[in-house]
Image (cartoon, helix red, strand yellow):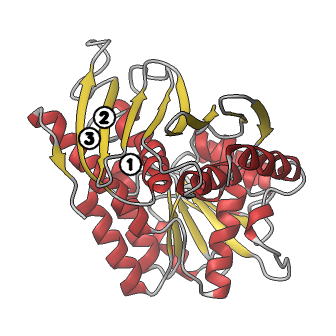
């Protein structure tokens, strides 16, 4: 696959995305839909997941869990959720007796992911957990084990595992044509930190931008490379000492792969960056913006730049894919094991930040 072929293929895909957000997921049947309950009705659920569930073909919103009565009333009106399918955190475990709910989607602060994922699995429900799945790789292990014990499927909220432009970038990166990749850059950042934000609380968020944005850029690097990195060297920077306590505002690191490919990455809560760059010698492909949801993406090489539409809500494809995994009993692409892999890398980044040395990444 040449760069020109990749751009042409993406342009064709981009036109179709505007028509069907589930383009790459195959033919779907609307005869059977699975019920989804959203747990936590913050900004991501309100602005992304709720609207995305209006576009899904194989699943639909049927329940909510919130500790805020006002939110419950608003969601009941907006989405037609009945009181019998509305829960708070004290009644959460009653979900096991609700046959309308097949999938529980955990959209809570990071430190709550493991507890509520495991409780939902024990209630007999399949689970989607937002990233990062756990606070560290060990916590991810407990969640994977709980899914296996319950005989239920577990997906992590990795919408870009199903996004056509990212899939095409990965395909080009791994094609032998024009040689193998030598250098990558994957970076994502926003000026979003503010006092009281749970994401910058070390106990609630676990590491600021590293935990919140790190999985995106790590996934892009290792999926383009088609292999695990073998080591990482990391740096952290605090640009506002009054705001960042116990974490960094900006994180940078270099992933090294066994074939000597290098990926430079940056994540930040202090400044904007959104870039996915893969180079083979003097040839390259770049997506920018690359990781933010619901954006137009610009694909560029040495000669051309093409702006391509992405799906209005990329999560619709992600959730429909999981519903089909359940209905067809097929393996989950954005699996808990994938999330555990990313957390092993994040754990190594944290170790490198503490030691100031390059750290080997466990397989």
- Of mark 2 and mark 1, the one earlier in the sequence is 1
- Left or right of residue 37: residue 57: right
Relative depth, front residue between 181 and 14: 181
Q: Which numbered circle lies on residue 203?
A: 3
Q: Earlier in the sequence, mark 2 or mark 3?
A: 3
Taking the spot 43% from the left edge, 47% from the top edge, the residue there is: 215
What residue does disc 2 label? 253
Which label was assigned to residue 110?
1
Where disc 2 sits, the SS reads strand
Cα distance, mark 3 to mark 1? Answer: 9 Å
Above or below for 305 versus 8? above
Secondary structure under the numbered disc 3 in the rendered image:
loop
* Residue visible at 52% across and 24% down in the picture: 273
Nearest to viewer (mark 2 / mark 1):
2
On residue 84, the disc is: none
**Mark 3 and 1 residues: CB-CB less than 8 Å, in contact?**
no
Cβ atoms at labels 2 and 1 below 8 Å apart: no
Residue 88 appears in the rendering? yes
**CA gap, disc 2 to disc 3?**
22 Å
């Amino acid at each position: 696959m040449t760069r020109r072929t990749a751009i042409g293929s993406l342009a064709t895909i981009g036109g179709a995305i505007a028509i069907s957000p589930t383009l790459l997921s195959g033919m779907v049947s609307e005869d059977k839909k699975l019920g989804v309950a959203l747990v936590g009705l913050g900004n991501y659920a309100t602005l992304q997941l709720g609207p995305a569930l209006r576009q899904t073909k194989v699943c639909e919103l049927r329940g909510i869990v919130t500790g805020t009565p006002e939110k419950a009333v608003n969601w009941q009106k907006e989405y037609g959720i009945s009181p019998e399918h509305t829960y708070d955190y004290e009644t959460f475990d009653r979900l096991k007796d609700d046959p309308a709910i097949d999938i529980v989607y955990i959209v809570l602060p990071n430190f709550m992911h493991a507890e509520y994922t495991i409780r939902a699995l024990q209630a007999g429900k399949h689970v989607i957990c937002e990233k990062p799945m756990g606070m560290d790789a060990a916590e991810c292990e407990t969640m994977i084990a709980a899914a296996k014990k319950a005989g239920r499927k577990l997906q992590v909220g990795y919408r870009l595992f199903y996004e056509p432009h990212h899939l095409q970038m990965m395909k080009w990166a791994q094609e032998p044509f024009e040689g193998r990749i030598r250098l990558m850059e994957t970076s994502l950042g926003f000026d979003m930190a503010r006092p009281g934000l749970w994401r910058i609380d070390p106990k609630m968020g676990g590491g600021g931008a590293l935990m919140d944005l790190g999985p995106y850029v790590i996934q892009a690097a290792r999926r383009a490379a088609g292999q695990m990195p073998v080591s990482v060297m990391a740096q952290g920077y605090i640009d506002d000492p009054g705001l960042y306590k116990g974490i960094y505002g900006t994180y940078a690191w270099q992933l090294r792969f066994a074939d000597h490919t290098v990926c430079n990455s940056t994540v930040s809560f202090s400044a904007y960056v959104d870039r996915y760059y893969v180079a083979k010698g003097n040839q390259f492909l770049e997506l920018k913006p690359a990781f933010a949801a619901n954006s137009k993406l610009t694909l560029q090489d040495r000669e051309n730049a093409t702006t391509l539409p992405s799906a209005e809500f990329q999560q619709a494809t992600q959730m429909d894919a999981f519903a089909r995994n359940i209905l067809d009993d097929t393996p989950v692409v954005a699996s808990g094991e994938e999330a555990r892999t990313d957390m092993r890398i994040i754990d190594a980044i944290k170790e490198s930040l503490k030691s100031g040395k390059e750290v080997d990444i466990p397989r």
